[in-house]
Amino acid sequence: MNKNKAAFSELITKGYNPNGEFIILGAPLFDNEVLQESPIKLALKTFNRHGLIAGATGTGKTKTLQVLAESLSEQGIPALLMDIKGDLSGLGAAGQTSPTLEERAKQIGIPFKASAFPIELLSLSNEKGAKLRATVSEFGPVLFSKILGINDTQSSIVSILFKYCDDHTLPLLDLKDFKKVLQFISEDGRVDIEKEYGKISTASTGTILRKVIELEQQGGDAFFGEYSFETEDFLRKDSNGKGMLSIIRLTDIQDKPMLFSTFMLCLLAEIYTTFPEQGDQDKPKLVIFIDEAHLLFEEASKALLDQLESIIKLIRSKGVGVFFCTQTPTDIPADILGQLGLKIQHALRAFTAKDRKSIKLTAENYPLSDFYKTEELITALGIGEALVTSLDEKGAPTPLAAVRMKAPASRMNILTPTEIDQIVSESKLIPKYNQIIDRESAYEILCDRLEHKATTKESDQEEEAKPTRKTAPPKPEMSTLEQAINSPIAKQVGRTVARELTRGLLGVLGISTSKKRGKSWF
């Protein structure tokens, strides 16, 4: 192992010296000495190449995530953060200095300056914040089938159901709509739909229904519906030009991985669809941080993983970076791990033979170094220290460096309930997203249709029992369907039309369909 300090310092200075804009992560360590003269600079240009923050519990992963989010915000770059543990809200309040922080700042040569950052609190469930939702129709049949984890035969029935709703102007907005249409094509509408689209297995529709109920029990009924989120709301800045940090509070869905995977896949697909192509720019347009990323992959099917891998590969061209925060790199599927340019590895602990094997595998994910024994160093890192390798502006890996990280400028703890209430009260998104919208959709239209059919049948039976008389034919009333067509179309409906027409995205992502689908009215 090379012990030449001057050679190491020269290598690091050259490897972490970008020409464009950058953020400073900390200072490198060499033989337990901090080298202030060679700070670790990360080129903003490479932040759309994605990244990984890994390490054992209590080693400083979340604080590193916090530092990255703060640094991006200061550069006017907005970020979207998945807060599984509930400890990222502290970004909205200034930190407090302490002897420990002052000592670290002195060691690495980067002054500590307490600062708060603009945050927006978002929620998928009952947590305080602006509610994020999406309609079933916006998912499309292929993506919705993948979320349910059903087989090809069952997926074809879902495609038929979507096509039927397109052809008969039945908006699919929430899971209630989907279940009602599924019930209808299995019972009252079975004969008509089989004439039009072919035979449908009752066993398959039963399986699909059970999968939908499972998703519903994980909180999917709160997520599917209106008002649908608009991706441009993640791109805001405050009056001082700092990038808005949108924190999605997910503390109450830790035990609902299907809902988490559903939302993340929808979010990434929607961002990919709506953001324009921009190639490599001087800085990213948006950076997404996924804390406790293993939850995203825990119960994901191979088809779902393939979909995620495709989006991760393609979304960088939209100026979007995705960062996964987890305990070990092995939590991330290999095909996705290979797409991550920036890797920040905090300490791992070797208590068992399995741990030692995992550490060996982890060390192999990092570039070889003449100055470190990577496998040994991973277990010797202190709190707030990490192994770092990134990509330079030409896309080549930078030298491996053990780094003493700078401390977050914001609070390293959660906000109080009073502080959260204050932020919620000042939110510009809550009036937009927390209004209750339940417009007429497939559920109401089919219920009216079935009720009308039952009433008509009863009237016909009464008429048959009466003596025959000649009467003038009754003036036909406008049907519920006609009323829906002739009623004013709200902005949300127009947005859903546009997003429905982007179902072709699935083809872009490598998922082909057997024939073109009809136009949608919703």
Image (spheres, rainbow, N blue to C red):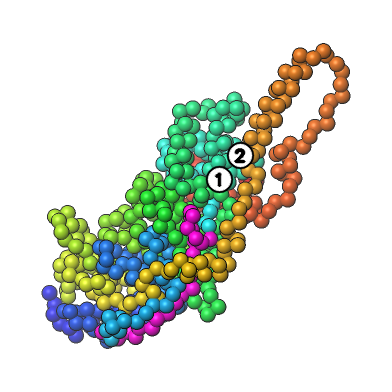
User: Which type of secondary structure does the marked residue at label 2 adopt?
Assistant: helix
| Residue 110 lies in the magenta stretch | yes
Residue 89 visible in the current orientation: yes
Can the viewer see residue 339? no
Q: Position of residue 387 (x, y in %)?
A: 25, 71
Q: Indicate the amino acid at tag 1.
A: Asp
Of 313 and 402, nearer the camera is 402
Residue that carries the numbered disc 1 in the rendered image: 174
Say which residue label 2 marks: 443
Check whether the beta carbons of the residues at disc 1 and disc 2 lie within 8 A of each other.
yes
Q: Is residue 170 magenta?
A: no
- Relative to 45, residue 215 above or below: above
Q: CA distance from mark 1 to mark 2?
A: 9 Å
In depth, the one of 507 and 81 nearer the eye is 81
Magenta part of the protein: which range?
A: 107-130
**Residue sitting at 57 percent across and 62 percent down?**
430
Q: For residue 344, what is the image quadrant?
A: bottom left
Q: Where in the figure is residue 184, as x and y percent of width and height? A: 58, 32
Question: Is 444 on the left or on the right of 368, as rendered?
Answer: right
